Amino acid sequence: MSGLTERIAAAKAKGRRLVEDWRVRRPWLDHLIRTAQRYELQSGNRLAGAVTYFAFLSFFPLIALAFAVLGYVLSNDQNAIDALTQAIDDQFPGFAEQLDINGIAQAKATAGIIGLLGLLYAGLGAVDALRGALREMSMTTTPPLNFFLGKLRDLVSLILLGLTILASVAVSGFATQATTTVVSFLNLDATGFNTGGLFLAGLAAGLAADWLIFVIVLGWVAPPVGPFRYVARGALLGAIGFGLLKQLAGLLLSHTLGNPLYGTFAVIVGLLLWINFSARLVLYVAAWTATAGLSPPPAPSPIPSSGSPEDEPSKNGAPPGQTGGSSAA
């Protein structure tokens, strides 16, 4: 039994040495390991849960306020409202069916007031929870802002994030629909090259909007601890992951809609899961950004000699114990 225990311990030690060697030779792997360690050390899942709660509460007032504003701006353009409804349905299948969007747009005054009040409560709470989570991930020692300045900064962050998220959803949703329209408007042949190029252009625009979202989150909501180049790289990584999550949202909501176990709560459950995954992605990116400036572990050093200085060869090549012109007694 003791022999088996010793072999297991030896295998673990060999594995640790192998991982340490890989971390020294491959900085990107060391960075990923430090990111995961920072996320676990700071209880990232618990922080993501707090952000999810307020973000979920603020989602519905945000939708109501957006369509109330559209009710004022596009009151005579039903086609534009239908297009935005389809864009939301493309990103969150089945969600638009649960809302009386035309009713919200027509009752613009009441929906606008309710949406604004709800968004101020839940939205500011979501930004505050996000700011606290980002500070935890960065392990910053900078004291937080006072109450009034903090709420003012949260309000600006909420406005910036709301506008950018709506732009990201709209751009991603319209990318596919606009392809055929642009091809016919420019009198281009509906070949795979033309439609594919326009579709990729729409995806690039959506990626740029998602990158801007993460720049705001990492660089404004909570002041970064490193230079802006780390924020820009982390924002690009987060934008790619967020784009994949938006594609995953369609599959996730389609699965929950077809599962009778969830029933009428299918859209709500799917939306809640998607928000939680997005919050975890944001915190992983924050951990990646916060650990970007740290150095990899040093390479193993040779074991120093235990002999005395007299036992080492002198600089002029004399034997140990002798100097240039004298001999040992």
Image (spheres, rainbow, N blue to C red):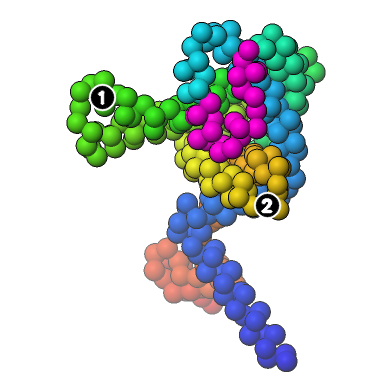
Q: Quick check: 6 left or right of 288?
A: right
Q: Is residue 69 above or below residue 264?
A: above
Q: Is residue 282 above or below residue 209?
A: below
Secondary element at image label 2: loop
Which quarter of the picture shows residue 283? top right
The residue under the point 61% across, 32% down is: 97
Residue 91 part of the magenta-drawn span: yes
Which quarter of the rendering shows the N terminus? bottom right
Q: Nearer the viewer, residue 166 or 107?
A: 107
The answer to whether residue 277 shows anywhere in this view is no
Which quarter of the picture shows residue 104? top right
Residue 64 part of the magenta-drawn span: no
Which span of residues is magenta-colored?
A: 85-106
The answer to whether residue 320 shows anywhere in this view is yes
Q: Looking at the picture, which amino acid does disc 2 mark?
A: Pro
Question: CA gap, disc 2 to disc 1?
Answer: 42 Å
Query: Residue 298's x, y, as percent?
Result: 53, 56
Q: Which mark is residue 260?
A: 2
Q: Nearer the viewer, residue 110 or 308?
A: 110
Q: Quick check: 229 left or right of 279?
A: left
Query: Residue 281's x, y, as percent?
Result: 59, 42
Q: Which mark is residue 126?
A: none
The residue under the point 42% across, 63% down is: 315
Mark 2 vs mark 1: give the one in front: 2
Residue with the mark numbered 1: 184
SS assignment for the magenta stretch, majority: helix
Q: Looking at the picture, which amino acid does disc 1 mark?
A: Ser
The residue under the point 71% across, 37% down is: 52
The residue under the point 67% across, 44% down is: 266
Q: Is residue 110 above or below residue 36?
A: above
Q: Pick out the residue farthest to the right.
A: 147
